[in-house]
Amino acid sequence: LAARVLPLAVTWNAYRWTDAAGSRLAAERVPMLPLVMSRTDGGARRWDSVAEFPACLAPMEQATFLDRESGDFVPAGGHLHSASAGVNIDFFRRAAELHFARTAMAGMQAAMLRALHRDDQSEASTCIDWVEELKRLEADDDSDESGRCC
C-alpha cells in the first residue's frame, strides 16, 4: 500500500477545471482533498452535481464524498468519472440540494461531532448543544435574503 499523504489543501465542490493529465499533475504536486457533498437516499448515494460539469474536463483526483447526515468521508471512486454530466432536471435538483454553504456546514458539523464523540464525550455534548442552537437559529430564518452571511 502507498503511504498516506496528508492534504495540503482542502477544496469544496471538486470543480472540474483541467483535463485528466492536469488533474493527475495537480494531485502529484499539491496533495488535495477535494470534497463533494453527498447523502444517501434509499441506499443509493447522491452527490452535488457541480462536480460532474463540464463533461469535457476531468474530475479531481482523490475526490471524496462528505456525507451530509453522518459526517462520513467516503472515497468517490469512479463515481465522478462515470457520472452523466448532462445538464437536466436531476442535475439542478442535486445542485440545489447539496451544493450550497448550509449543506456544507451541516456535513462539517456532523464530521466534527463524530470526531469529538470518539475522543471526548464532554466536548461532544458541548458541540451538540452548539449545533442544536444553530438549528434553532436557522429555523427562525428560513430565507437566504435575511442579510446573514451564512
Image: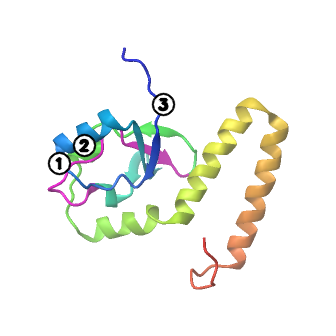
Please name the predominant secondary structure of the magenta segment in the image: loop
| CA–CA distance in space, label 1 to label 3 | 24 Å
Q: Looking at the rendered structure, which numbered label has been put on residue 23?
A: 2
Q: Earlier in the sequence, mark 3 or mark 2?
A: 3
- Contact? badges 3 and 2 (CB < 8 Å): no
Q: Looking at the rendered structure, which numbered label has been put on residue 65?
A: none
**Residue marked by disc 3:** 6
Q: Is residue 56 magenta?
A: yes
Amino acid type, label 2:
Ser
Task: Name the residue: 46% across, 38% down.
Answer: 8
Q: Is residue 60 magenta?
A: yes
Task: Name the residue: 44% across, 23% down.
Answer: 4
Q: In the rendered image of this protein, does residue 79 appear above or below residue 135?
A: above
Amino acid type, label 1:
Asp
Amino acid type, label 3:
Leu
Q: Nearer the viewer, residue 117 or 30?
A: 30
- Crowding around mark 3 (Cα neighbors within 10 Å: few <14, some 14 to 19, many 20+) is few
Which region shows up in magenta? 52-68
**Label 3 residue SS:** loop
Residue 127 point in image, percent of width and height: 77, 49
Q: Looking at the rendered structure, which numbered label has been put on residue 19?
A: 1
Toward the top, the furthest residue is 1
Image quadrant where residue 87 sits: bottom left
Left or right: residue 117 compared with residue 148 = right
**Label 2 residue SS:** helix
Q: In the rendered image of this protein, does residue 93 appear above or below residue 58?
A: below
Image quadrant where residue 78 sits: top left
Q: Is residue 64 among the parts visible in the rendering?
A: yes
Left or right: residue 142 compared with residue 46 = right
- Contact? badges 2 and 1 (CB < 8 Å): yes
Task: Name the residue: 40% across, 47% down.
Answer: 45
Left or right: residue 130 compared with residue 139 = right
